[in-house]
Amino acid sequence: MLNARLFQMMNEQLNQEFYSGYLYLAISSYYATEGLSGYAHWFKKQAGEELEHAMKFYDFIISSGRVVDFKAIEKPEQAAFNNLREPLQLSLAHEKKVTGNITTLYNTAKEIGNTSAASFLEWFVQEQQEEEENAQNNLTAYENCNFDIDCMKKLDRQLAAR
Ligand SMILES: [Fe+2]
Ligand SMILES: [Fe+2]
């Protein structure tokens, strides 16, 4: 069974993954209303991935003999944006924060000596590397366009292919 501290942290991370999904849906809907359907699609897909992450925590908690403690999901910290860049910056900052939480969780599992939790979390450590990279790439690609409309449209089409 998960010890109380690790359970509490895993349970919190489950909630945070749902929150990430909420945040990315907020971003997706913003881009949709701005007419950038590729960006909207990309972030909607990302929201789906976050829900899959939540389910991984759900399954792990259940299989370790604990009952999931469902808490309220916070509303997205930002849902209205001043420009197309803001959500990209926000998602990068958000993924960095999540990486910090996952690292703490992973280190705690190792400290406690819960090897099955630690190996479960290894997947997330890798995944966070990828998530941060994607968020950084999105931001960089946007900045490289330097407000050129054709360049933006091309990016939007690329993101639609995810
Ligand atoms: Fe996630
Ligand atoms: Fe993520």
Image: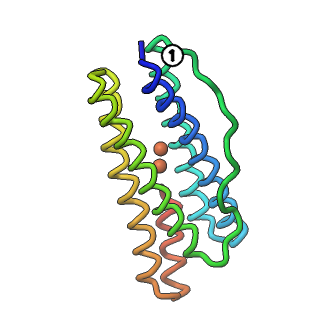
- The residue lying toward the viewer, choosing from 70 and 8, is 8
Horizontal side of residue 128 vs 51, given as left or right: left
Residue occupying the point 70% across, 50% down: 75
Q: Quadrant of residue 104?
A: top left
Is ligand 1 within 8 Å of the beta carbon of the residue shown at mark 1?
no
Task: Please give the residue where the numbered disc 1 appears in the rendered image.
Answer: 62
The answer to whether residue 24 is above or below residue 88 is above
- The residue lying toward the viewer, choosing from 61 and 112, is 112
Horizontal side of residue 159 vs 120, given as left or right: right
Q: Position of residue 110 (x, y in %)?
A: 27, 29
Q: Position of residue 135 (x, y in %)?
A: 43, 62
Structural crowding at the residue carrying mark 1, measured as other residues with C-alpha within 10 Å and reported as few (<14), some (14–19) or many (≥20): some
Residue occupying the point 52% across, 25% down: 58
Residue occupying the point 52% across, 79% down: 152
The quadrant of the picture occupied by the N terminus is: top left
Q: Position of residue 96 (x, y in %)?
A: 42, 57
| Element type where label 1 sits in the image | helix
Q: Position of residue 66 (x, y in %)?
A: 51, 14
The answer to whether residue 128 is above or below residue 72 is below
* Colouring method of the image: rainbow
Q: Amino acid at mark 1?
A: Ile
